Every structure is written in structure tokens, then in C-alpha cells.
Image (cartoon, grey):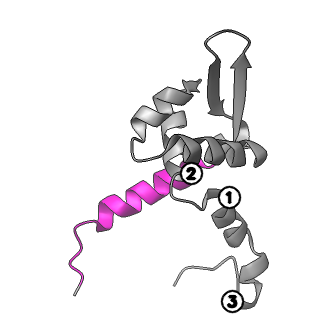
């Protein structure tokens, strides 16, 4: 069995729980994925098109949360119509290997028979 980095007693205050709190939500992982795939920046409407199941309000609120968590940056250009771009900060980029591991795990187990 592999070594665990958190005991049951420590789980609430663990790094594991902190990581979950940062990426928790229906769309944060997808936003991280698309921003990583389209570096250096992506515009709001491009993100909306890639994640067509997300509402404008939810996307806006999720991006604000991710900006507060210092995962992404927002650059606004003073022009009409408004132009806003988003990109990954180093802290956000550091989550990409975690996403890659999740993808690898999913590829290995997506055809498992669950009985």
C-alpha cells in the first residue's frame, strides 16, 4: 500500500483538503484545462464557447474566485467593446500535473467493469 500524506485525524487541515477547496466546483478544472491548452491567454467568450454548458454568470463568478485564489490573471483593455483576457499564473500552472494525473487515471480506468 502506498504512503499516505494525511492521516484521518489531519484530513480536515491537510494539503489534500486545501487542494480540493481550490479546484472544487463544476467548472474550475475545465477552466484550468482550457487556459492551459490555449496559453498564453484566452478571452471570456472563447472560454464560454469551449464550456458551452456554463452560464455567463457562473463563468464570471468562477473566474473571479480563481483570480482571488491566484490561479489565473485577468487583463482588461480600455476599449469599446470591452476586451478581457484570462491566463494562468504560475500557481495555476502548478496544478497542471495534477490534472494530467487525473487524466491518466481516467484513461486507465474508464473501461473498468463496475459490478
Q: How many marks?
A: 3
Gap in angstroms between the C-alphas marked 2 and 1: 8 Å
**Category of crowding for the residue at label 3, using alpha-carbon neighbours closer than 10 angstroms: few (below 14), some (14–19), many (at least 20):** few
**Category of crowding for the residue at label 1, using alpha-carbon neighbours closer than 10 angstroms: few (below 14), some (14–19), many (at least 20):** some
Give the residue furthest to the bottom: 9
Q: Quadrant of residue 8?
A: bottom right
Q: Position of residue 54 (x, y in %)?
A: 46, 46
**Category of crowding for the residue at label 2, using alpha-carbon neighbours closer than 10 angstroms: few (below 14), some (14–19), many (at least 20):** some
- Please give the residue where the numbered disc 1 appears in the rendered image: 22
Q: Earlier in the sequence, mark 2 or mark 1?
A: 1
Q: Earlier in the sequence, mark 2 or mark 3?
A: 3
Magenta residue check for 110: yes
Task: Name the side, left or right, on which 49 lies relative to 95.
Answer: left
Q: Is residue 4 visible?
A: yes
Q: Residue at x 55, y 79 (%)?
A: 2
Circle on res. 8: 3
Give the residue furthest to the top: 79
Q: In the image shown, does 5 or 67 lie closer to the viewer?
A: 67
Q: Position of residue 72 (x, y in %)?
A: 68, 38
Q: Position of residue 111 (x, y in %)?
A: 22, 68
Magenta residue check for 32: no
Q: Residue at x 59, y 24 (%)?
A: 41
Gap in angstroms between the C-alphas marked 2 and 3: 26 Å
Task: Name the side, left or right, on which 102 lies relative to 39.
Answer: left
* CB within 8 Å, label 2 to label 1: yes
Q: Range of the magenta residues? A: 94-114
Q: In the image shown, does 54 or 95 lie closer to the viewer?
A: 54
Q: Quadrant of residue 10?
A: bottom right
- Please give the residue where the numbered disc 2 appears in the rendered image: 28
* Nearer to us: label 2 or label 3: 2
Gap in angstroms between the C-alphas marked 3 and 1: 20 Å
Asked which secondary structure carries label 3, the reply is helix
Amino acid at each position: 500500500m502506498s504512503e499516505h500524506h494525511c492521516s484521518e485525524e489531519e484530513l480536515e487541515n491537510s494539503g489534500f483538503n486545501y487542494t480540493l477547496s481550490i479546484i472544487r466546483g463544476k467548472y474550475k478544472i475545465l477552466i484550468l484545462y482550457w487556459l492551459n491548452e490555449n496559453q498564453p491567454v484566452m478571452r471570456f467568450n472563447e472560454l464560454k464557447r469551449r464550456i458551452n454548458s456554463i452560464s455567463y454568470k457562473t463563468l464570471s463568478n468562477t473566474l473571479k474566485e480563481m483570480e482571488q485564489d491566484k490561479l489565473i490573471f485577468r487583463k482588461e483593455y480600455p476599449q469599446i467593446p470591452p476586451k478581457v483576457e484570462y491566463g494562468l499564473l504560475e500557481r495555476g500552472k502548478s496544478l497542471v500535473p495534477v490534472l494530467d494525473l487525473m487524466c491518466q487515471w481516467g484513461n486507465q480506468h474508464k473501461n473498468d467493469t463496475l459490478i
